Amino acid sequence: MVIIDEFHHAAAASYRRLLDHIKPLELLGLTATPERSDGMPILHWFDERIAAELRLWDAIDQHRLAPFMYFGIHDGLDLRDIPWRRGRGYDVEALSNRYTSTDAWARLVLQETRKHAEDFDTMRCLGFCVSIEHARFMSRHFNEHGVAAVAVWGDSPDAERRAALRDLADGTVRAVFSVDLFNEGVDVPSVDTVLMLRPTESPTLFLQQLGRGLRLSPATGKAFCTVLDFVGLHRSEFRFDRRYRALLGGTRREVERAVQQRFPFLPAGCHMELDEKSSEIVLRSIRNAIPSRWPAKVDELRAMRSSGASVRLSSYLSGTGLDLPDIYDGTHSWSDLVQAAGDPVAPAGPHESTLRRAIGRLLHVDDDERIDTYRELLPSDVPPGLDELPERRRRLVRMLVASVGDRALAKDTSLQDAVALLWDHAQVRHELLELLDELDERVDHLHGALDHHPDVPLQIHARYTRIEILSAFGIGDGARVAAWQSGVYEAKDARAELFAFTLDKSSGAFSPTTRYRDYAISQTRIHWESQSVTREDSPTGLRYRHHERDGRSIMLFTRLRADDRAFWFLGPASYIGHVGERPMAITWELRYPLPGDLFANFAAAVA
């Protein structure tokens, strides 16, 4: 998980209170160092895990940060012949020369700022530039056109920097242009306009620059921050997907879909828009910046291994810009790629090909309990004895083997035999461990255990497939899990109703009579429609309405689209009321509020 810099201001008071508690420890002769040598505050005290976080979407929804209006504007510059250094990006001097070679580009920036700023005459603007020359160039141009501006950079005297920010805050200066100076730590809440005047590939830098304008400013009544991002024609190495993934989350393919659909899932009050040319450039970059054909992926791995260094799945993804779905495309796996590149793998088991292809069914795994349990069990060449495991861990094992071994198992295969089958495939287990290491780095929500069901190993706001859900609730005895065809499954032994529903039914094999409207009303309430034949006084309708009286739990699982394999587990819910029948439009109250990003997605899915 990542705490983004712009949230530090909101957390500063809490952090200072924590430090106040540290001082008494030092008086007792105990050493408590809030800052480690690597700069990550006190994280080692929490087992290298962030114990609490405030995500961008939550911060905006809770009105701790201002909404933003983001505009991607094509600026007409062609950067494709600018030299590029791997690991460093564009050559700074050549890039600066390109931006400062003509006043036409600066005129465009000024024109677009006038057009988009909420109030150009009173704006407080920060502009992020490539070089000192670029910052001076922009400042001179704005001043020549009647807009008070200054340029500052790393070597500027401290007094000069402070004066620039003070003048910006009080309105004496309307624009400050900087070079790698105000990406973080700027405390000017009144900033309401951000100009991204340099190619910013780094996701951290992109978020830091965006965050400079998200501080709340009651004194000025700032309603939102205007962000203008100027987009030129880029080299194929430049990666737009990295910045948008940092902001929006999801895979590279999901970012591509968001761009195509004009960013449908944003917090309330936020807006993102790319003009036609910028959209074309961004989509082309997302599709073409990385190897897409299988032979190219193999060649990339060979090239990375040519130095003699070992290349793991995580380092390959980082080095190539590929994402997990690019490796697990339904026909290949990481072991297939390693083998095709000529590197040794463990001897194949009897179902090697089938199990390797099935590994891609686990890309959604996103909670510590599954990851830690599987990483503990898989290294051993001896399969775990299920009779020795507590029920909760036994179900976790079944969730794994039922998911990976589903197509290799006979109908009556016992769970212990299924475990033995998986453990007979050493390379599959080795690949699973590499995948789990990568998935562990991608855990992006805080999870909580399911109350009142201690044997059910599901975490609130984690994602699960139908196979995993039924395995977790102990449905069936063997390794394989029975098919779950309808949207509601009655888990009688667990005294629970399991609801699995899709929010966006505009695509997929949904008939007009099954396109129920399901969506988030708020962070604690879900609107859900039953099957079209359900009456309010039918046994099914009464089961829904009186579940608490009858001691039955309602468990909600949802996904955005029909092609999503896994469902978000929303946790237990309570019946609030309903409208009509055939279908019944039921409102459910969630015991655990939705995180801001999920609420933004779930509320907009049917908008």
Image (cartoon, rainbow, N blue to C red):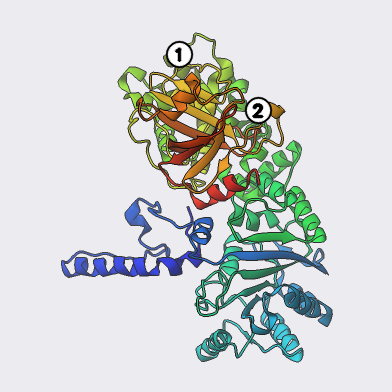
Tell me which numbered mark, 1 or 2, is placed earlier along the sequence. 1
Query: Which quadrant of the view contains residue 273?
Result: bottom right
Report the residue at 49% width, 25% height from top.
541
Pick the residue in front: 378 or 151. 151
Most extreme residue toward the top is: 412
Q: Which of marks 1 and 2 is in front?
A: 2
Q: Say above or below: 286 vs 381.
A: below
Establish if 405 lies above or below 323: above
Q: In this view, does 606 lie to the left or right of 524?
A: right
Seen at 23% across and 70% down, the residue is 23
**Residue 308 makes an appearance in the image:** no
Image location (x, y in percent) of residue 578: 51, 35
Q: Residue 365, relative to residue 55: is it above or below?
A: above
Q: What residue type is labelled 1?
A: Gly
For the residue labelled by badge 1, is the local secondary structure a helix, a strand or a loop? loop
Q: In which quarter of the image is residue 233?
A: bottom right
Q: How far apart are marks 1 and 2 (CA)?
A: 32 Å
Q: Which mark is residue 514?
A: 2
Q: Name the residue under label 1.
A: 478
Three-letter residue code for mark 2: Thr
How packed mark 2 is, by other alpha carbons closer than 10 Å (few <14, some 14-19, many 20 or more), is some
Q: Which of 538 and 11 is in front in this view?
A: 538
